[in-house]
Amino acid sequence: MKKKQVKRVIKIGKFEKLLYAFTIVLLVISPFAIVFSQATLSKINFDVEKAKKQLNTQEKKNESLAMKVNELASLDNIKEVAIEQGLSYNNNNIKSIIDSKE
């Protein structure tokens, strides 16, 4: 007597079908997501470098203007302006305010 071999058919349930579909969709979408995120990161880095350049330019302008203010506020310049305006120059009446932001 021979035993009959029974073929078993494995049925895939709804959850497994959903899981397989999700895995396939994930495998298809992930390369696009990676490329998109890298492009976004590159754009952000470009914007940061642009902002750094603008910051450096503005800092140089601020330093130049601070030097100009110091030059205009020098005692020699005050004396010249006072004489040009017909005022008397008295060094004892001049009070100097020191900037302590350094």
Image (cartoon, grey):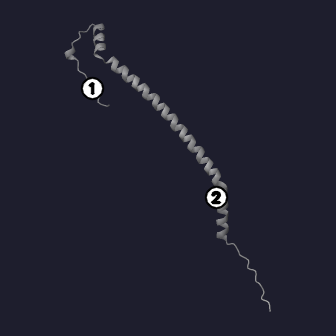
Horizontally, is 85 left or right of 7 in the view? left
Disc 1 residue crowd, few under 14, some 14–19, many 20+, Cα 10 Å: few
Disc 2 residue crowd, few under 14, some 14–19, many 20+, Cα 10 Å: few
Q: Position of residue 69 (x, y in %)?
A: 35, 21
Residue receiving disc 1:
98
Q: Secondary structure at mark 1?
A: loop
At label 1, the amino acid type is Ile
What residue is drawn where x is 21% and y is 14%? 91
Q: Residue furthest left?
A: 92
Q: Position of residue 7 (x, y in %)?
A: 76, 80
Q: Position of residue 102 (x, y in %)?
A: 32, 31
At label 2, the amino acid type is Leu
| Residue 26, label in figure | 2
Going from the N terminus, do you reach mark 1 or mark 2 first? 2
Question: Looking at the rendering, in which quadrant would you find the N terminus?
Answer: bottom right
Q: Position of residue 10 (x, y in %)?
A: 71, 76
Image height of 12 relative to 95, above or below = below
Q: Secondary structure at mark 2?
A: helix
What residue is drawn where x is 28% and y is 16%? 75
Please tell me which residue lies in front, 19 or 60: 60
